[in-house]
Every structure is written in C-alpha cells, then in structure tokens.
Amino acid sequence: MTGSSYGERDYAFGQLMLTLRTTIGLTQASLGDLLGVSRRAVAEWEGGSNYPKVERLKQLIALGVLQQVFPAGREVEEIRALWFVAGACVPSC
C-alpha cells in the first residue's frame, strides 16, 4: 500500500512533482519505469492524491540533480523546498 493523504489533495506538492518530471523531459510512464512504480502512481503524486515513499522521492531528486533541472546555485534551496512541501506526508521506506 502506498501512502495516501485520504483527505484534501495536496496540489502544491503535485505541481512540484509535475514540474520536476516535465523539466526532466519524461512521461509519467517513463518516470514510473525509472523509479520502479506504475504510471498511475506518478499520476497520483502529480494529482496531489498520493505521495511517493521517501526512497522514491530521493531517487527523483537525484535524477533532477543529474539532469541539472534545478537552477544553478539554487539546487539545495530547491531540493529543500520540495522536501519541505512533502513534509510528514511522505511515508518512510
């Protein structure tokens, strides 16, 4: 079972996930393949109805760093912002 908010949708987190994926240049299916999850799981993250596990979020951030999608000189700030928005909602591994 994945960690679901079962409440209000978290559109802020979903928008960050969508922006990160599209900036990397991946489809939901291709990101899911890279992270070992389904396309539907990625869609739920982006829709704000579910959150990735911590390990998946770490993989996504690492991919973003590798692809240099975070603004130069602001990488740490951007990553912290993403992590902060995820907050306690992201289930542990």
Image (cartoon, rainbow, N blue to C red):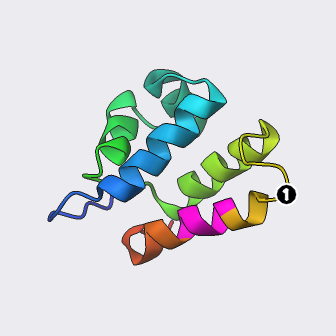
Residue closest to the far bottom: 88
Q: Quadrant of residue 39?
A: top left
Q: Is 57 within the magenta?
A: no
Residue 52 as seen in the image, left or right of residue 57: left
Q: Residues within 10 Å of mark 1 (few under 14, many from 20)?
A: few
Locate residue 41, reporting x and y percent.
Answer: 35, 40
- Image position, residue 18 (x, y; %): 45, 39
Q: Which residue is mark 1?
A: 73
Q: Position of residue 22 (x, y in %)?
A: 54, 30
Total marks shown come to 1
Depth order, front residue of 10/56 = 10
Horizontal placement of 19 versus 64: left or right? Answer: left
Q: Residue furthest right?
A: 73
Q: Is residue 61 above or below residue 31?
A: below
> Is residue 37 shown above or below 81?
above
Q: Main secondary structure of the magenta part?
A: helix
Report which quarter residue 55 is drawn in. bottom right
Taking depth in this image into account, of 66 and 15 the one nearest to the observer is 15
Q: Secondary structure at mark 1?
A: loop
What amino acid type is highlighted by mark number 1?
A: Gly
Looking at the image, which residue is at 72% across and 48% down?
70
Q: Quadrant of residue 88?
A: bottom left
Tell me residue 26's x, y (percent).
57, 24
| Residue 79 makes an appearance in the image | yes
**Closer-to-camera residue (55/44):** 44
Residue appearing at x 55%, y 52% in the figure: 56
* Residue 92 visible, this orientation: no
Which residue is at the far left?
Answer: 7
* Span highlighted in magenta in the image: 78-83
* Residue located 36% across and 47% down the image: 45
